[in-house]
Image (tube, rainbow, N blue to C red):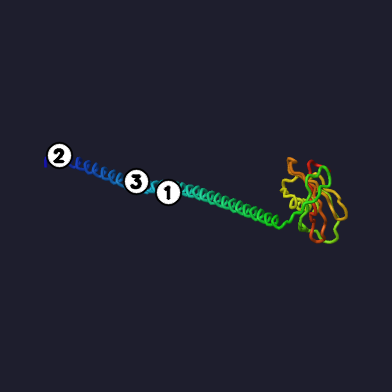
Amino acid sequence: MSEFDRVSRVDKFEKRRKNTKSISLLLVLGAVLLIVLIGFWMFGGDDEAAKEEESKSGNETEQNDTEKDGNDESGDHFTKVEEEDSTNDTDQNNASENDENEASNDEDSENANEDVQIEQLEPSGDNVVEAYTANWEPIGTEQQGPHTTNYDDGSQDRIEISRAVAMATGLAENNMTTHWVGNGGDQKVEATVSNPDNTEIYRVYLSWVDNKGWQPTKVEVLQEVDI
């Protein structure tokens, strides 16, 4: 073998060795890159999926919270409406009951007035325009036992006296002005009352009936307040 042939073969071998080394290096780099890509795809994909899932979960939670708030507001609205309806129903029922009570009281008063038989009397003085008596019944009482008249304002006697006076005169008890209440004798009282503008003035005589209360016995219509 000539020297030239030997050198050419060595060069070819050296070139082949270098090419093989380069190819091996490229294969190694390609394998590493492939491993990196696979790892990124696997772990990176999980992260993206996790982020996507987390985002989706957050949106669903926000939507549920919104729906819950809407339901709460709707529930509060319905509750308020129900409360208002209940209040209106209660007010209407109370108003209806009051109207029925007033109608019943008016009917009782009319029936009582129909049963009352009035007898005219002679006026007892110049200030007396008219005098009359009637078959009034005792007003009723909550007092028991021996009776001693209590003239103090707010006492049970004063309350029942006002009730009896209103019955005899026809004045409204809650809109009646009491000018004077005093002793009219043994278990008797006299009361001077009027309407608020003093256009109707009365002097009423009452007697106490045990266990039955104060009973009007005479009414005088006065020209002016005379105590």
Q: Kindly identify which numbered label has been placed on residue 218.
A: none
Q: Position of residue 126 (x, y in %)?
A: 83, 42
Residue type at mark 1 is: Glu
What residue do we see at 84% from left, 45% from top? 125
Q: Is residue 29 left or right of residue 109?
A: left
Q: Position of residue 55 (x, y in %)?
A: 41, 46
Which badge, 1 or 3, comes first in the chain's sequence?
Answer: 3
Q: Position of residue 28 (x, y in %)?
A: 28, 45
What residue do we see at 88% from left, 53% from top? 185
What residue do we see at 85% from left, 58% from top? 147
Which badge, 1 or 2, comes first in the chain's sequence?
Answer: 2
User: Alpha carbon of mark 1 to alpha carbon of mark 3: how far?
Assistant: 29 Å
Residue at mark 3:
40
Query: In this view of the protein, which residue sits in the foreground, 195 or 7?
Result: 195
Which badge, 2 or 3, comes first in the chain's sequence?
Answer: 2
Query: Could you say which quadrant of the image residue 137 lies in?
Result: bottom right
| Quarter of the image with the N terminus in it | top left
| Quarter of the image with the C terminus in it | top right
Q: Is residue 209 left or right of residue 89?
A: right
Q: Secondary structure at mark 1?
A: helix
Residue at mark 1:
60
How many residues crowd mark 3 within 10 Å: few (<14), some (14–19), many (20+)? few
Residue type at mark 3 is: Phe
The answer to whether mark 1 and mark 3 are in CB contact below 8 A is no
The answer to whether mark 1 and mark 2 are in CB contact below 8 A is no
Residue at mark 2:
8
User: Alpha carbon of mark 2 to alpha carbon of mark 3: how far?
Assistant: 47 Å
Q: Position of residue 219 (x, y in %)?
A: 78, 50
